[in-house]
Image: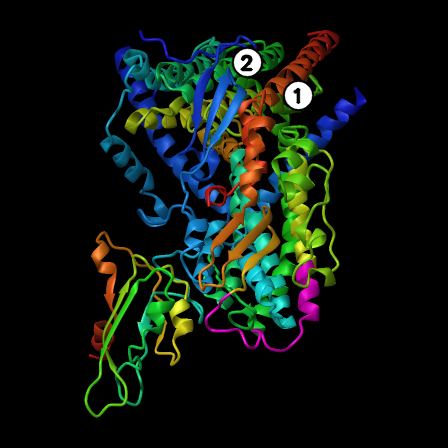
Amino acid sequence: MRATLREIVLGCRSLLVGMRVTMVEFFKPVVTVPYPHEALRMPERYRGPIELVRDPATGRAICYACQLCARACPSGCITVEGVKREGERRKRVTQYQLDFSLCSLCGACVEACPDAAIRFSKRYNWATPHKEEFLLDLVRQLEQESR
Amino acid sequence: MTPPPATVQAPGSGETFLLNLGPQHPATHGVLRLKLTMDGEYITRAEPVCGYVHRMHEKMGENRKYAQFLPNTSRIDYLSAMHYTHAFVGAVERALGLAVPPRAEYIRVITSELNRISSHLVWFGAFLLDLGGFTPLLYAFDDREQILDLLEAITGSRLTYCYYRFGGVCHDIDNAFLEGTRAFVARMRPRLRLYHELVTDNIILRNRLIGIGPIPLELCRRYGATGPVIRGSGAAYDVRKTEPYSVYPQFDFDVPVYPEGDSMARYRVRMDEIEQSLRIVEQALERLPSGPVRAEGVPRVLKLPAGEFCCAVEAARGRFAVRIVSDRREIPWRVKLRTPSFSNLSLFEEASRGMMLPDAIALLGSLDLVIPDIDR
Amino acid sequence: MSVSLPEPLRLFALLAGAMAFVGLNAAYLVWAERKAAGRFQRRPGPTEAGPAGLLQPVADVLKLISKQLMVPPGADAVLFRAAPVLVLVPAMICLAVIPFGERWVAREMPLGLLVLFAFGSIQVMAVMLGGWASRNKYAIISAARIVSQDVAYEIPMLLVMITLLMVTGTMDLGEIVRQQAGGFWRWHLFRLDANPLMPLTFVIYYICMLAETNRAPFDMAEAESELVAGAYTEYSGMGFGVFFMAEYANIVVGCATATVLFLGGWQSPIGVGSGPVWFLAKLYGLVFSVIWVRWTFPRTQFYGLLNLSWKILIPASLFILVLSGAALQLSGS
């Protein structure tokens, strides 16, 4: 009998303690970010879909289509093509296609690149009803940026 | 009036009906399906049907290079990505005889333990959700968010970190991470007290967990259950102690063991593990050596010597082991993944026999299953 | 709702008033609950629709209305459709007899308390009917739970009521409130002279009320993590919406009953300035506590409620009953 009563009293006490906890939290400030109105900044190392890096000297992409990124990619989502023009030491990238619908943002391509010609963008909120929109032409993207 | 097909009868009447729990059900946290043969509200047989999220990770391992398989390892059990990557790089490092720089090992331990805490926090929230308490989930996620922010800053990703590399880690950690981790450890201890006040001591929760869903040690052994499940049944089995890897032997931490085997024991094991992980992180931060974070001389093209290489780690859900069979090519001949959730789920059928539905759901929640980890 | 209206008009006003009250009350209690739940969980709750999310209930109702009403194949269509109505109507009838103020009562009845309890238990049966008619296994498990849950808490609730009746000596709700005039120490909650365990009586009533309205921690009938949505699993659109409204209407009825019986109804706690404002303040204070309880505790196990009822609440309320009888006998009334 005494044990039961003790249990009841302790049980009720635990309930009151729990209610005190939630009441204390009730008056604390909100911790969430009101997302569409306010967004967090992505950290420096954030892995978004990749983009080509511009060579500040020439204004063109650093990439010379060595294919290392395409070979490193576990999902085979990168297609790179380049043309060697006369009088130039290296090829120039003409097409850099990324099928973002296959990409798992693992970063193997960025690590494989010997000249840091690609990097992660900070793009994170990307949705589309059309799969084709995820077929990215990174060369054109770079050109559009410069305009 | 068409009578419904199922009739609810007193237990022992022998008249049963089939209840499909899942693949879409709030309590299975994913696409697990349980075919329950019910006698009223009592379960006479629970048959797990898995494979709804089978992604062929093992087969994928057989047709890509070692480095290309790394991203997969974070996706098998997305809640303990660090541990899974650790096991895979560990196996390759053992095969190549790579010596990992001490700083890298310490970083691995810190990130692994943070990952363990975040995984346990998800479990804590989801488990309470199974028991009908919604608020603890959001408190746990608030804390977990701190860990994710820290890990995101150094790895670039919030869940599928893919941070470890053969012979080290991808990037070095910076001062902001160290400060942030110290602040997190300082924050987490009072939060644990809050959890105990709000949840652990709560009489409703205690009545729902104490003595419910007992799993005898013998049953755990028979099904190969590991992690908090077997530790909640009285066996001090922790891969970090029994098959030491990385620099874990240098740390002072306890393996929480509760002999009762009920849902409460598993609950307590995990809550205590958060505490122990905080201890490990604290020690690692104190003694963090300087130096490189990647081993020298890791070949660009990895070819493992012929043979079998194995590495096991203590993941958040139990023992995760990778076995690589190599035939000297760039691509492994076989990658076997031993995932803890599969074994932990397997014992559910035997353990849940004769239980009432809500208790069985408490038992299921206390096993802390990650469905993609079961199906691989 | 003045007293001087002719009878048919009065009935009409009562009906329209009750419907408007139930609808608005449910809509804005949902809003309030979501806001409060947000605060308990340190998030803002609804903010997008209207200032502070105040138009959220409107958006919700529009969404629910625009959805198709489905009767699952093989279900008992008549019972399936009747169940939501049967849940809502008793709550509205109960509202008719509750005195919100001295003259603020739709229909004063000498047996008001009896009406409250007679109609109060119908809604449980209606939820059971809905579960049974759905032809869904989860819904049927839920229906079976409701039946035994019903038995478990109705008994202590009625025992507590008998205790209270012994103190008040009347079933007229207005009269009961008038007895409690003159400051909070005159409220039945603090009538320790009639029964030293009066606050305990209130606690028992409160627990039973949570169980009757299917609120956490006794929401086994809905139990979303076990039974998907329990008896409501197969309901869509406004069918579900009406159950939802009824849940809040029943909470208000339960809390209003508690206010009348224990907290002095419209009487001011300091003895002066009594009025409907006090009634509403006490009522919604209690409603807030119900929300608070829901967002704090996990759900009880089913036999947990039965144990609580048969091993603790029923013996305790019987003891209170006997004590109360003895106290009244001794005080010579």
Taking C228 as reference, is C92 above or below it? above
The residues bearing labels 2 and 1 have C-alpha atoms spaced at a distance of 19 Å
Residue B133: x, y in percent? 54, 36
Point out the image quarter for the N terminus of chain B: top left
Question: Is C250 positioned to the left or the right of C323 in the image?
Answer: left
Q: Name the residue located 53 percent from the left edge and 21 percent from the top edge.
A: B43
**Chain letter for the residue marked with disc 2 in the picture:** C
Q: Are marks 2 and 1 in contact (CB under 8 Å)?
A: no
Query: Can marks 2 and 1 be said to lie on one chain?
Result: yes
Q: Quadrant of residue C102?
A: top left
A77 or C3: nearer the eye?
A77
Q: Name the residue located 31 percent from the left edge and 47 percent from the top edge.
A: C50
Residue C90: x, y in percent? 39, 15
Q: Is residue B297 magenta?
A: yes
Residue B220: x, y in percent? 65, 35
Front label number (2 vs 1): 2
Residue A83 shows in this picture: yes
Q: Name the residue located 40 percent from the left edge and 35 percent from the top edge.
A: C30
Secondary structure mostly seen in the magenta stretch: loop
B234 or C325: nearer the eye?
B234
Assess disc 1: are there few (<14), some (14-19) or many (≥20) residues with their C-alpha within 10 Å of its C-alpha: many
Disc 2 or 1, which lies upstream in sequence?
Answer: 2
Residue C293 shows in this picture: no
Residue C278: x, y in percent? 49, 31
Start-end of magenta stretch: B280-303
Taking C209 as reference, is A75 above or below it? below
Callout 1, which amino acid? Met
Callout 2, which amino acid? Glu
The residue labelled by disc 2 is C154
The residue labelled by disc 1 is C198
Local secondary structure at mark 2: helix
